[in-house]
Image (spheres, helix red, strand yellow):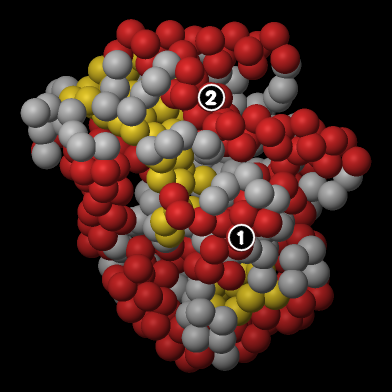
């Protein structure tokens, strides 16, 4: 029997970077694959040429909350499910697993996979407004996660425990898969680093990723170390209200604090030049791909003890974890690795071993296939 898999994502760019390999594997196993997406930024997708995948646009904004628009999104997803009649839906990130989870139950989709790739700012913000929104959303989340034949994928145990503690999910329908994985063979650990010590942060340019802390650390470190470069690789996320402003970025560039190179298409090449990879995030991460890529590249990491980030390293073995929003601790960790490059090399080698063991894309894809098979077998397909 040819099963029909429908993957629902916020945007097509994310699907290509994080879930395309899963779709390709499903195709190779005989699945028919449909991808529902809410937005796209590229004009041309060479990666999608000749693939037997049906792409369907769904009216679903990645950022912001407008009640009428959100209800319209749920209705459109419901119509998509009714029209396509998938055997399995794979819902990735917050709006897809929230709205898609609701629509899947109403449309009587037989099997549901909900991928929690981090809980985002909704669960990390401590203000009154996020708490009120979360209070309102709690029964909706419980409904979205309440399908009788559903598996919820988490990338770290903290997110799982948090949703369990709030009685949003139950323990018996969850599994842990460490991130979206990386293509290990694309990363070649080597000594072709820049002649000047280089610290790289590759991320969306939103405040919660620790961008401002990275820049402040760069300012302090450059006073002591005259020959060190700080590279910021990423694009402004216009859909996110906490995106770094163009004015602030222009000021950093003008003052020579960091080199901003925009979105990096070739992460393996960028990381091969770096001496240290940094991600001082306090965002509610799943398991950041940047940390998986840093490990694959054999580079030491400086990140935070924030859930998700701490799951991407072995503290003091493959990198150093510091408290979130602590610029002084961030400075101390980066300076330590700058002063002791041989320790950074050892950390990088252990990071490469970590990547091979846990972050290999082939391993991650196989784990997803097993989730699909488990649901189908349980539902007597």
Image check: 275 left or right of 306? left
User: Split into 4 quadrants, where in the image is the N terminus?
Assistant: top left
Q: CA distance from mark 2 to mark 1?
A: 22 Å
Quarter-wise, where is residue 104 in the image? top left
Going 53% across and 10% down the picture, which residue do you hit? 75
Q: Residues within 10 Å of mark 1 (few under 14, many from 20)?
A: some
Q: Label 1: state its secondary structure.
A: helix
Q: Camera-side residue: 95 or 21?
A: 95
Where 15 sits versus 195, above or below?
above
Is there any visible trace of residue 341 in the rendered image?
A: no
Q: Which mark is residue 102?
A: 2
Where 250 sits versus 282, above or below?
above
Q: Which residue sits furthest right?
A: 128
Quarter-wise, where is residue 372 in the image? top left
Going 76% across and 77% down the picture, which residue do you hit? 329
Give percent across and percent down for residue 25: 19, 42
Q: Camera-side residue: 262 or 365?
A: 365
Kindly indicate whether the residue at mark 1 contacts the one at mark 2 (C-beta within 8 angstroms): no
Give percent across and percent down for residue 172: 45, 54
User: Split into 4 quadrants, where in the image is the C terminus?
Assistant: top left
Is there any visible trace of residue 44 in the rendered image?
A: yes
Q: Which mark is residue 369?
A: none
Residue of label 1? 161
Q: How many marks?
A: 2
């Amino acid at each position: 029997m040819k099963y029909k898999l429908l993957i629902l994502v916020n945007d097509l760019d994310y699907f290509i970077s994080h879930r395309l390999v899963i779709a390709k594997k499903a195709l190779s196993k005989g699945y028919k694959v449909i991808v529902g997406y809410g937005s796209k930024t590229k004009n041309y997708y060479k990666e999608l040429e000749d693939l037997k995948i049906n792409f369907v646009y769904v009216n679903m904004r990645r950022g912001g909350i407008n009640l009428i628009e959100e209800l319209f999104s749920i209705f459109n997803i419901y119509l998509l499910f009714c029209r396509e009649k998938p055997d399995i839906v794979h819902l990735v990130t917050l709006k897809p697993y929230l709205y898609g989870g609701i629509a899947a139950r109403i449309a009587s989709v037989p099997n549901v996979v909900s991928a929690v790739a981090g809980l985002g700012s909704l669960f990390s913000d401590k203000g009154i407004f996020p708490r009120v929104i979360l209070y309102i959303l709690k029964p909706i989340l419980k409904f979205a996660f309440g399908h009788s034949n559903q598996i919820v994928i988490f990338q770290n145990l903290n997110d799982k425990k948090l949703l369990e503690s709030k009685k949003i999910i139950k323990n018996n329908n969850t599994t842990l898969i460490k991130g979206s994985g990386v293509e290990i063979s694309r990363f070649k650990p080597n000594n072709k680093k820049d002649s000047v010590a280089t610290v790289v942060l590759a991320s969306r340019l939103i405040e919660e990723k620790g961008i401002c802390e990275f820049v402040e650390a760069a300012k302090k470190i450059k006073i002591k170390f005259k020959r060190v470069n700080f590279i910021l690789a990423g694009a402004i996320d216009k859909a996110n209200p906490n995106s770094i402003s163009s004015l602030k970025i222009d000021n950093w560039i003008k003052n020579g604090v960091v080199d901003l190179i925009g979105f990096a298409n070739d992460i393996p090449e960028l990381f091969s030049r770096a001496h240290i990879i940094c991600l001082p995030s306090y965002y509610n991460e799943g398991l950041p791909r940047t940390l998986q890529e840093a490990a694959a590249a054999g580079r030491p990491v400086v990140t935070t003890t924030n859930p998700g980030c701490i799951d991407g390293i072995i503290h003091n073995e493959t990198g150093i974890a510091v408290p979130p929003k602590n610029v002084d601790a961030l400075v101390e960790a980066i300076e330590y690795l700058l002063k002791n490059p041989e320790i950074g090399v050892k950390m990088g080698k252990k990071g490469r071993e970590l990547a091979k063991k846990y972050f290999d894309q082939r391993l991650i894809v196989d784990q997803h296939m097993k989730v699909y098979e488990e649901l189908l077998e349980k539902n007597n397909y």
